[in-house]
Image (cartoon, rainbow, N blue to C red):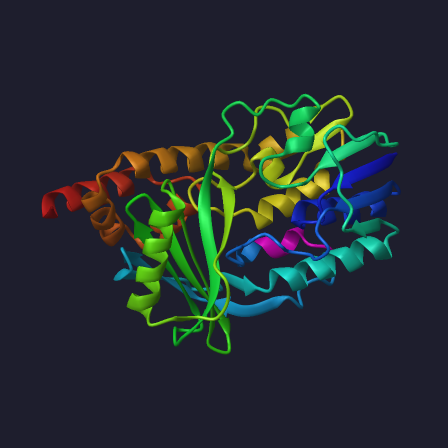
Amino acid sequence: MRLVVVGAGVAGLSCAYWASRAGHGVVVYEKSRELGAKPCGEGIPEDTMRHLPPGCGDFILNRVAGCLLCLYWRPLRRVESASTFGYIIDKKAMLRELKEAAESEGAVVKMGSRVRPWSRLECDLIVDASGNPGSIARWRGLDYRGYRSIPALQCYCKGRLSEDEILISILPSGYGWAFPRGDRTVNFGVGGFSSLRALEAWLRLGLRKLKLSLSGHIRAAPVCVSGPIRRFTAKGVVAAGEAAGLVMPSSGEGIKYALFSGRICFTKSYERLWKSAFGRRFQRGKAVLKAIIATPEGLRGRVIAEAGDSLVTQLYSGSRVPVLELVKALGTALLRG
């Protein structure tokens, strides 16, 4: 089978590697001349590593053992992990490793080459891995009604933060993060249901509160928060990664799901395999996001402060949540309000 992959991001290069390894002919088109042009928090959970090609992993910058949760950049509590919490990565380096792995299996990656939605392509299958908002797949018949995004801002900073701990802050209409990359460098950003002007104000407040100094440009990008589109496949085309809405609504996590969708998107069992692995998790993630939005601002922080470590991580990852534990945390927060 001949595949054309649109986009040399995580999903596209994952697809290129696994499809080439399976014996298919693969050509990847990437409109940018550089890999990893889109802003990214560059944090991944530990289990992301199992979805990578064998031997990949030199892109890891930091191992993280815990998380400092904040409310409007003011510390609320620490969430500890008995094992590795996750990793901070150099995403550009990760993409270079994926590209090299794909090319070693015979894939052709063409940088600086744009594919238009209406372009005539000689292939058996088009994989839209172009990211948000999936214009190739949309043009070719996939249903994007309900696809929703929020703006996010990201930058690199210098400062003294704990090297083995990430920081997540609850903001009035969104969230903020500070992920240490080592050598006093921090990946810093905000995202939410707000205007870019409002988000930038929260970003700059966070810089002041955490005593971070901006060391580069502030970059903006949309992030999908609506979860998967209704169908991933149509005649001659499939969508993978963020082009299919595969970003966890409750946390913004997308790299793991991009890797996995890229690995299976060219198979006939794509949708079945996806739903079996992550379908319910995304349903829970959407429910958590709706609950967060519906919860009064003052109560959000109190619930997080009262919840156990495992409950907090389960809420953000879309894992199955112990209902009684959640009710207990909510009740305690209300009583103390």
Q: Is residue 49 magenta?
A: yes
User: In the image, what residue occupies the spot 31% across and 67% down?
Assistant: 208
Res 269 seen here: no
Q: Which residues are magenta?
A: 48-53
Give whichever of 165, 32 is nearer the camera. 32
Counting every numbered tag in the picture gives: 0
Q: Position of residue 292 (x, y in %)?
A: 31, 39
Task: Characterize the magenta stretch by its predominant secondary structure.
Answer: helix
User: In the image, what residue occupies the spot 59% across and 49% down?
Assistant: 256
Judged left or right of residue 195, residue 119 is right
User: In the image, what residue occupies the spot 20% across and 44% down?
Assistant: 299
- The quarter of the picture where residue 260 lies is top right
**Relative to 156, is 24 above or below?**
above
Q: Position of residue 203 (x, y in %)?
A: 36, 57
Image quarter (top left, top right, bottom left or bottom right) of the N terminus: top right
Q: Position of residue 131 (x, y in %)?
A: 62, 41
Q: Position of residue 248 (x, y in %)?
A: 49, 41
Q: Is residue 203 magenta?
A: no
